[in-house]
Image (tube, grey):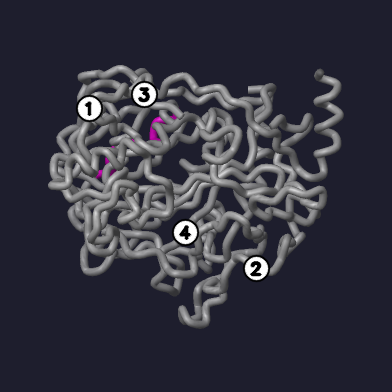
Amino acid sequence: MAYNQQILEALSPWQSLRFRDSEIPLKDAASSLSSTENLVIAKPVGKTSTRWMLYRANTEKVALFCHAGVWAWNSPLSTGNYVPEGQSAPEGLPEGRIQNQPNYKCELAYAFDTSVDDSLWKHFRIFEDHVKKQPNFNKGSRKRRSWQSGVDPSTRTKYVMGAKLFARRTPLNAKDANTADGQEYLVPYEIHPWILEGLRNFPELHQVPNPHRPMYYDLSEGVLRKLKDTNEPVFQKNDIVRVVFSMAFIIGGINWYPEVIPIEFTRVGKLPGYMTASADLSSFPSISADFTPLEIGSPVTLINLPVTLGKRKASEDPSTDSHIDKKSSSVTEDSKEDSPSTTTKSVKANETTDTDTVMTDSTAEPPPTTESTELEKTDDPDTVMTESSTEPSQTDTHAVTDTDALMTDANAADTPSTDDTNAASDQSEGGSDRPPPQSKSAGGKRRPADLAKKGKENKASNN
């Protein structure tokens, strides 16, 4: 592709910047594992040896990674593959994937286009090599599952992450009273009417909306908003999307595999039309308290300092300090060294003024201009959608228990091989699906601060 280098340059700043002290850029964590000061370490969760997670080195805090990539597709952001009886299924969602009742098979899927930038694959491979070296990991010498292993380069055109739509009801995630508007559910997002209807119709299933479902944001012209409150309330193909996530490794009865647990997605830009990527469309420990949710109406600090090792006690850890200064109307990058821009960055949410400076230069010249489901059913057992035959632990609400249960192209070459279809109860595989055509909606332009003026001139000339 003629613009591969420009695409990589557009992504590079967002793969380095942090919104919080508690985040670790994925590339920094991966590169540290080949140095004498590892930023992360893989350890078993509790007393079990079947689930391992990456923690910040020298702490008991789950490592929270940040990264950015080019968006490929996603399932409906609020409903996934759940469709109540009597409702019309979203275009492209195959009959075999539809769930009519709230249960652990209802899932959300998110895919990054990695046809140009394959850094996700490279960094995750480093993490896998690290966990394999840990004492007592995979004592049964089980094979790594082939799904999203990245061994075959032809299968590395996209990377799929997933999350559960529902969770088992407990006193910690729901109030005793039942209300028609869903106020009894302790979730940080607006619940879709389909979800409320299903929970009212099937109270005996004891389900609630997943309180750990990823959040969706948009950062445009220095202003942070909820994605649904923008002119373009869905992620679109070729958006530049920033993701925060944690990572686990699951040892099943037949094989082992990594599990990416997304926490939030933020659209920070869009590739201009002349340079587009072309991917084939086809029990957890709690997060430490120093990870604070993004707050609408408050500034966000962009941190470009090296990640420090967690050598202090939790009470002394500087990362416990809030990343938001509510008294400040704008924030300045902590370090200019190796920064993609020397411009002060103002990202105050829901407030746009003439003094708001725009975000970092994220594209090469010329400047950039500023939902979906799945495909026809297939009976091939090697396709990538997976339905666990047994209900997972009720603490497993952060992400899809088996990331095979995600959408992908029925014709893609990266479907798992038949040796993985015999997996134990934690991974029986189902149909394959493709997202429908992307919806078209007008979105605001995003451009770096030092290219904003030039962008207006280019736009005038194009018109």
Report the Cα–Cα distance between label 4 and label 1: 38 Å
Instruction: Identify the amino acid type marked 4.
Output: Leu
Does the CB distance between marks 4 and 2 fall below 8 Å? no
Earlier in the chain: of badge 3 and badge 1, it is 1
Q: Residues within 10 Å of mark 1 (few under 14, many from 20)?
A: few
In this rendering, the answer to whether 236 lies above or below 411 is below
Magenta range is 143-153
Q: Nearer the viewer, mark 4 or mark 2?
A: 2
Residue at point 28%, 44% (across, down): 144
Q: Which residue is mark 1?
A: 85
Instruction: Identify the amino acid type marked 3.
Output: Pro
Q: Secondary structure at mark 2?
A: loop
Q: Position of residue 306 (x, y in %)?
A: 63, 64
Q: Which residue is mark 2?
A: 325
Instruction: Give the farthest residue toward the front.
Output: 180
Q: Which residue is mark 4?
A: 64
Q: Is residue 302 left or right of residue 289?
A: right
Residue at point 29%, 47% (across, down): 180
Q: Decide which of 39, 315 is in the foreground and name it.
A: 315
Instruction: Identify the amino acid type marked 2.
Output: Asp
